[in-house]
Image (spheres, helix red, strand yellow):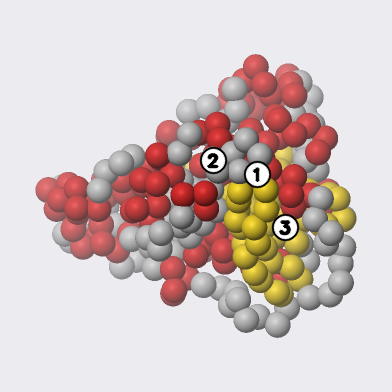
Amino acid sequence: MQREKIDAKVYDLYDEYCHTQMTRRDFFNKASALAVVGGAGLAMAKALLPRYAEAQTISFTDQRIKARYVAYDSPGGTSGQMRGYLVKPTGDGPFPAVLIIHENRGLNPYIEDVARRTAVEGFLALAPDGLAPIGGYPGNDDDGKVMQKSLDKDKLFTDLLNSARFLKGHELSNGKLGATGFCYGGGVVNKLAVIMGTELSAGVPFYGRAPAIEDVAKIQAPLMIQYAENDPRINASREEYRNALEKHKKNFVMYTYEGTRHGFHNNSTPRYDEAQAKIAWQRTMSFFKKHLN
């Protein structure tokens, strides 16, 4: 189903489903009860579910990259151990490094594909799985979001911070670290910028929660902050964040993409906006090439 044919009320319900403990059954039941224009709410709801196999853009067998899963220590995290998806460009390196942080459901196939896209651009990419200490991404987003919700938030962040430091110090890294993330992962990028100071060389959060305003002064890394136009939950803090960055004279640029919704970069669902996602990704890669090489 084309994105334009899905009623706005179903999109709003899908956003609630993604970011709460609403079950798929409840999502479908509530969608069925909606009065919508141009079709049935249930059909629209089903059309919004991710189709990861169809959305893959870079195969793991692509000759330009080499991908594998790696394990590493994570002191202070959920279990003391972590696992991530490491993708390197062909060649000997060293390479500039980019951490890719998942949404609120673990390391799903979309995020793995983003890691491969990043490596194709010449970066050593690591996509950590925050669910690894409790079994890893379970193969579906419904169980994934329940698992991620069960984790201690501070320990989960520690696992992602340790992932950033593992990647920065990797033998194939040139020592310059960038970070990008989506939704929950975007908020993590903002927090990493606060915590890591000059350890982080550049950050690109996509529709992520802003850090505490009193912490903005601690940010040292250049930031490119990406927002969807129609995303009231995240955008509620946008102007306050912008004002704080300006007040403290931080190096940043902020974009809001016209006609988009939360999740517009994720090409596995109709929320995807191909034209705007392409612009946002080109900007992201150019930003990292500027600050990490």
- Answer yes or no: do the residues labelled 1 and 2 have beta carbons within 8 Å? yes
Mark 2 closeness class: few <14, some 14–19, many ≥20 residues within 10 Å? many
Return the disc, 2 or 3, that comes first in the chain's sequence. Answer: 2
Q: In which quarter of the image is the N terminus?
A: bottom left
The amino acid marked with disc number 3 is: Met
Mark 3 closeness class: few <14, some 14–19, many ≥20 residues within 10 Å? some
- In terms of secondary structure, where does tag 2 sit? loop
**Which mark, residue 74?**
1
Query: Is residue 89 depicted above or below 247 in this figure?
Result: below
Q: Tell me where residue 13 sits by quadrant.
A: top left
In the visual, does 234 lie left or right of 114? left
The amino acid marked with disc number 2 is: Thr
Return the disc, 1 or 3, that comes first in the chain's sequence. Answer: 1
Residue ID for mark 2: 78
Q: Tell me where residue 244 sits by quadrant.
A: top right
Residue 164: x percent and y percent? 71, 46
- State the residue in front, 106 or 33: 106
- State the residue in front, 117 or 229: 117
Residue 211: x percent and y percent? 60, 28
Q: Quadrant of the C terminus?
A: bottom right
The residue lying at 80 percent from left, 43 percent from top is: 201
The residue lying at 80 percent from left, 55 percent from top is: 170
**Which mark, residue 258?**
none
Residue ID for mark 3: 285
Residue 277: x percent and y percent? 56, 58
- Answer yes or no: do the residues labelled 2 and 3 have beta carbons within 8 Å? no
In the visual, does 12 lie left or right of 201? left
- In terms of secondary structure, where does tag 3 sit? helix
Q: Disc 2 or disc 3, which is closer to the eye?
A: 2
